[in-house]
Image (cartoon, helix red, strand yellow):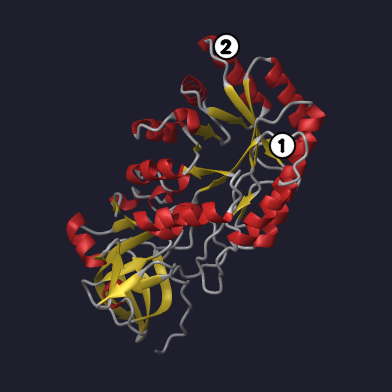
Amino acid sequence: MNAKPKAIGPIPAGYEARDGNLIIGGRSADEWVEHAGRTPLFLYSQSLLEQRMADLRAAMPERLRINYAIKANSFEPVLKLMSTLVDGLDIASGGELALVQQAGIDTARVSFAGPGKRDSELEAAIAARVTLNLESEGEAARALTIADRLGIAPRLAIRVNPDFELKGSGMKMGGGAKPFGVDAERVPALARHVIGAGADWRGLHIFTGSQALDAEALVEAQGNVLDLADRIAREADFAMPKLNMGGGFGIPYFDGDRPLDITRVGEALAERFASLPPSLEHAELFIELGRYLVGEAGVYLTRIVDRKVSHDETYLVTDGGLHHQLAASGNFGTVVRRNYPVAVAARFDAPPEEIASVVGCLCTPLDRLADRAELPRAEVGDLVAVFCAGAYGASASPSAFLGQGPAEELLV
């Protein structure tokens, strides 16, 4: 081992070895690849998805409702399963609305956030009884005009750009100038206008950030959200039918990351819910989660097609890469590239024997799935498993790059 190794992230709980092989959904990785007929392959574990939801329900106050943000993973079998486990779904485009409709899910359970909604998307959402989270006064005007033409009272909420952020979050979605939502001080006037125009008023959506592992930061942000919602409701003098408190729950990707203490978050929410102000005491209270619900339930399997040495460094060249796993390659918002959890599937419980970099098949130096990782020795034909692949893998990667095309996906 001449090269200095770089640590890999922690493999999520729930994965086991049988005769040395990685087991997912009761079968080995090799068996699933044989079943699918090819690699690369995303596998999503139904049992891990169900367990995550059960654990979350147990930790959160009974009153709290949970939405699934489908941008994390919109694979139809996963979408259908999640729709049976959550209280609602959040979308961010007309294309995602079409996916929900194709899956046969009741669109009255859906809310739609995101800047830059086209008129055609607004019309489709209004017609489908989707709740629109308005991102600006201009979007509100367009939605009301379209709804008037259709003869429908639109379901409208307002997305608030809060004057605070989620500390330590991977992506900050509030505080300061943002393309998302209406600045908090302008929300009361817009709310009064929307209600006065005859809309089916659905309350507020306040999203402060994502990928937080610090329970205390989340507790603080959620408390600030409740305080802000109360202030806006009192200033605008409206009843709060619904408050989407956003998400932000993170998962451990990298060495040193620790799982979020959801028990602490749930206890703090229960304490706040026990003494809500009059403006919120009858509101439906939601959080929306994507990555936290599905991320650790997914594994990306890619086959080694070449093993090579360059200047004393070993490279395991696979048939996958950043076109399916942009985030794992370090090119999806990461400032300093660090290794996701990876393993050699057929030697899942074997000790490391060498330092090797796992790279993809694309002709770019950005195509790297693991950098100088300590791994059991792997040969051509072996499968490499990349974990934490259930969120923002297939749904957030440039699968058309260099004509490679999408990976196979299975819910198992």
| Left or right: residue 190 compared with residue 54 | right
Residue 110: % across, % down = 49, 33
For badge 1, the amino acid type reads Glu
Q: Quadrant of residue 195?
A: top right
- The answer for how far apart the CA atoms under marks 2 and 1 are is 32 Å
Q: Secondary structure at mark 1?
A: loop
Residue 83: % across, % down = 42, 40
At label 2, counting other C-alpha atoms closer than 10 Å, the crowd grade (few under 14, some 14-19, many 20 or more) is some
Residue 121: % across, % down = 48, 26
Q: Is residue 101 above or below residue 332?
A: above
Q: Quadrant of residue 340?
A: bottom left
Residue wearing tag 2: 148
Residue wearing tag 1: 281
Image quarter where the N terminus lies is bottom left
Residue closest to the far right: 235
State the residue in front, 41 or 349.
Answer: 349
Q: Is residue 220 above or below residue 306?
A: above
Which of disc 1 and disc 2 is earlier in sequence?
Answer: 2
